[in-house]
Amino acid sequence: MASTTPAAITVAGLRKAYGSKQVLDGVDLTVPAGTIFALLGPNGAGKTTIVHILSTLIRADGGEVAVGGFDVVRQADEVRGKIGLTGQFSAVDSLLTGEENLALMGRLRHLPPAELKRRTAGLLEKFDLVEAAKQPLATYSGGMRRRLDLAMTPHGRSGDHLPG
Ligand SMILES: Nc1ncnc2c1ncn2[C@@H]1O[C@H](COP(=O)(O)OP(=O)(O)OP(=O)(O)O)[C@@H](O)[C@H]1O
Ligand SMILES: [Mg+2]
């Protein structure tokens, strides 16, 4: 079906070396909008390097990379405004409850108290964590932790997420 929505990710001829070590040597890939994509490979294959290039954290040596139709070098600010990024290791605190973890993120972003309360409630709802909201993270399953981690990740400037 024809669509005017730009691909979520387009990568063409991507190259990156660290010193004399060529890590990425002509990577091509397209991720259509609205799809879930998993990048798999052995340790040291270059997955994190690609994610860092896609999220504007480091520069490639060559190739074309666009996220949401924006070039990661020439339109880095637009790309940052569009994406959320969660790390290889979770940032959540297991002594706090899910709700407290979310509220902490909001406070770090200087949300006014009423806004903080509204956003926290909205995110708990959205990530299906309302019932577990008052429980400490130590009691969460892996999937619940993952959902909380995503809820705590900045997701650009649109919609009802915390601002990025
Ligand atoms: N800043 C750096 N300086 C030098 N070499 C680096 C740097 N970052 C990564 N590398 C090397 O580049 C290669 C790819 O690393 P990268 O972290 O992208 O792999 P990965 O696929 O994410 O691995 P893992 O599955 O272990 O997370 C590895 O050989 C790594 O040692
Ligand atoms: Mg990695």
Image (tube, grey):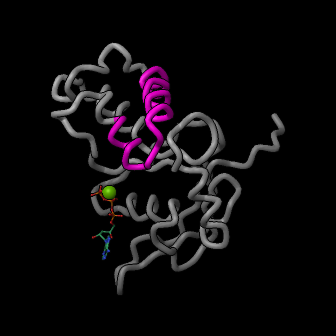
Viewer-proximal residue, 144 or 27? 144
Residue 158: % across, % down: 63, 42
Q: Going by the picture, which residue comes out furthest to the front?
A: 113
Q: Residue at x 50, y 60 (%)?
A: 55
Q: Is residue 24 magenta?
A: no
Q: Which residues are magenta?
A: 102-127
Q: Going by the picture, which residue comes out furthest to the bottom?
A: 20
Residue 108: % across, % down: 37, 49
In the picture, measured across the screen, residue 70 lies left or right of residue 102, that is right
Viewer-proximal residue, 131 or 20? 131
> In what quadrant does ligand 2 lie?
bottom left
In the picture, measured across the screen, residue 74 lies left or right of residue 132, that is right
Up-down: is 128 above or below 1? above
Residue 80: % across, % down: 56, 58
Up-down: is 149 above or below 72? above
Q: Residue at x 21, y 39 (%)?
A: 93
Residue 24: % across, % down: 45, 70
Specify the principal SS of the magenta part: helix
Task: Give residue 1's quadrant in the image.
Answer: top right
Q: Is residue 125 magenta?
A: yes
Q: Residue at x 22, y 20 (%)?
A: 135
